[in-house]
Image (spheres, grey):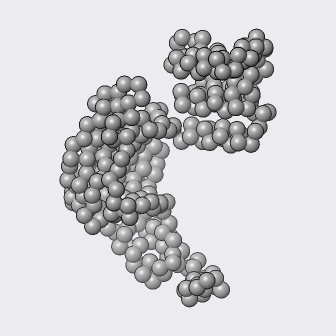
Amino acid sequence: MRIDPAIAALRSDGVPQRDAQKRLERARAAWLAEPGIGAVLRALEEYGRGKALADCGPLASLVSEIGAAHGLVDRLVRSMIENLRESPLGHVPFRHQCVDGFAVLQLAHSGRATLSLMQYVPPESANPPDSVCFTDGERHEICLAGAAQARCVSIAGERQDKAMLTCNSIRIDAATCLSFAGLRETKLVDRVEGRLVMLRLSRPAAKPLPSLEYRLSDGVLLHRAAGECGESRKELMLAVLGAMQRHDAVPAIAGLIREGSESLRWQALRECLALDSAAGFRELSRMAHRTADPLCEPARALRCDLLARYPQLAEAERQPCLA
């Protein structure tokens, strides 16, 4: 295996890597200490606590005025690039991620609010998107550089697990501003001309509804995910407990079936049924008999299906519930 001489040198002596990292961290600290940045961060804190964007002047200007946006971003990018030229193996001290054709750098975060720098480039796969995802919250964006053809996608109506989607073609170029609110509108970038750089301010709802992904061709619901990070963690924990066959966790899982969002409760019900079919079926029956429960109808359908397949489950309803 070939090892680049620069990496080999770092393996033998870690001091240059630590020095490079310190330079990048000093550049970030200097950027954060600038007077104009401080005003933006204070406004971000207020916005993250729920204040209206119109009442957060420096932040509102940032996503509506190209000069203000460049003033914030250019100083940081210039400083980081200068340091990376001297130390190309340094690690940019901001949260970031890259996927096919898309990169995001989180500049600041406070409460529910996040300020991010995004870059779109033509992905390796030239296939157009075949689905669209809607999340519950506010997103405000301004284009800093580049251009692209895109679509504004809205949910015009819903019926069972299907949505009526409307698409309007738009062109994005420097100084274009976009805003989306709630769970019924978003954008899709179809074709990037070179690259597209945008600054985004986002804030999820205080109690976000589940995110929804629909197929563009016919509006069929493809995926539903918890809109709140805490619920996502609980769903992951449920999956881990199920995979580990932790039968001792059944009482705790049964407790999650009785309160919380519909998505979390249904996931808890599935894991409970898998770990202890009798206990899970008792919880399912309880859910099916509560007409005010929004999960009543799917619970009734599942209960009837399970009884038809496994009549012996009827005996479980007559046993006391230990959970």
Residue 160 in the image: state x and y as whole percent: 41, 25
Which image quadrant is residue 214 in?
top left
Q: Position of residue 6 (x, y in %)?
A: 55, 86
Vertical placement of 27 versus 297: above or below?
A: below
| Residue 158 in which image quadrant | top left
Picture coordinates of residue 201 (x, y %)?
A: 36, 49
Is 99 or 175 nearer to us in this picture?
Answer: 99
Residue 214 relative to residue 323: left or right: left
Q: Name which residue lies at 66% across and 17% down.
A: 307
Q: Count every numbered label the image shows and give the total.
A: 0
65 shown above or below 180: below
The quarter in which the C terminus is drawn is top right
Look at the picture and state if 56 lies above or below 256: below
Q: Find residue 59 and report its horizontal and vertical position in percent.
A: 32, 50
**Residue 42 visible here:** no
Q: For this view, does 286 lie left or right of residue 55?
A: right
Q: Would you say residue 217 is visible in this rendering?
A: yes
Classify the position of the N terminus by image quarter: bottom right
Which residue shows up at 50% across the image and 66% down it? Answer: 93
Instruction: Locate residue 125: give its quadrant.
Output: bottom left
In the displayed structure, would residue 225 be above or below residue 31? above
Instruction: Please report the residue visible at 27 percent of the width from the left and 67 percent of the height from the top.
Output: 194
Residue at 25% across, 47% down: 151
